[in-house]
Image (cartoon, helix red, strand yellow):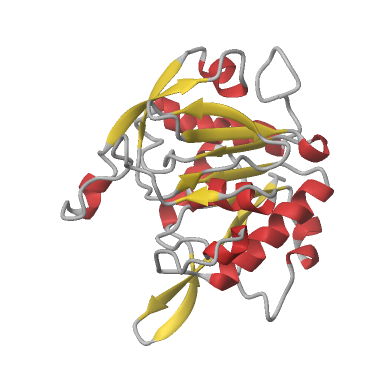
Amino acid sequence: MRPVLGIICCTRQVGVEPAQAVMNRYVTAAMRHADCAALLVPSLPDLMAAEEVIDRLDAVLLTGSPSNLEPSRYGEAETGDPPFDPGRDAIATGLVHSVLARGKPLFGICRGLQEINVALGGTLTREAGKGLAHHAPDDVPFMAMFDHRHDVALSPGGLLARAHDATRLTVNSVHYQGIARLGEGLTVEATAPDGMVEAVSSRIGGAPLLAVQWHPEWAPDTDPNSARFFHLLGRALRGQPLVPDGPA
């Protein structure tokens, strides 16, 4: 039996109805390149708690999303930039604390990185793009959004530097927000040329935590660097060291 990955859902509008949904690219990338089964976790905090499902999962993936965390989650009174998904905010926070308390792996992509940072006491900034464009122009077609790229510097000796055997990566960039104050217990794994944190890791609770601000799920079948993120997830799901030379 393959390990089971829990993947968080977003609240989306489908026609006239709200729906629990996650883009196929996150699910197929994880199932194919991490070689796992998957269960979707609905963001319905009025009907369930993360604590109720965490023991049925071997790890959790917090995906990207068009929505932003509500600023009140990290102590800001400003209204911020919609759309928001308060149900996802609540379930994501519960998943972070539950999975870390159980010592299970936690991975994040884009919004997922931001959710992890905020759940661990960090804050976000809406200033991404002031020194470097972290998002394609608003008028480009959807597919071209993910063609917007920049380099990131990998932290010397860090998990990603060792996993990729590299000092730099070129990554896609599709975000308007980013980390301001780093959450407790997190280590910076990569930074953009303007200093924006692009990846974090930790071993809170004894299991690996890895989150990136870019979108490795976009083209893992053709991009080995993107596929490697999910290979690391597959190793984490099986209790294996993420890199051969250490416990990460």
Locate residue 195 relative to residue 49 in the image: left or right. left
Q: At 56% across and 27% down in the image, what residue appears?
A: 189
Q: Quadrant of residue 158?
A: top right
Q: Is residue 124 above or below residue 204?
A: below
Q: Is residue 151 visible?
A: yes
Point out the image quarter for the C terminus.
top right
Residue 49 screen position, x and y as percent: 74, 70
Point out the image quarter for the N terminus.
top right
Q: At 21% across and 54% down in the image, what residue appears?
A: 138
Q: At 32% across and 42% down in the image, what residue appears?
A: 129
Q: Is residue 9 above or below residue 158?
A: below
Q: Is residue 40 visible?
A: no
Q: At 38% across and 78% down in the image, what residue appears?
A: 14
Residue 147 screen position, x and y as percent: 25, 39
Q: In the image shown, does 145 or 192 lie closer to the viewer?
A: 192
Q: In the image shown, does 67 or 185 lie closer to the viewer?
A: 185
Locate residue 147 relative to residue 184 in the image: left or right. left
Locate residue 135 relative to residue 156 in the image: left or right. left
Residue 176 screen position, x and y as percent: 37, 50
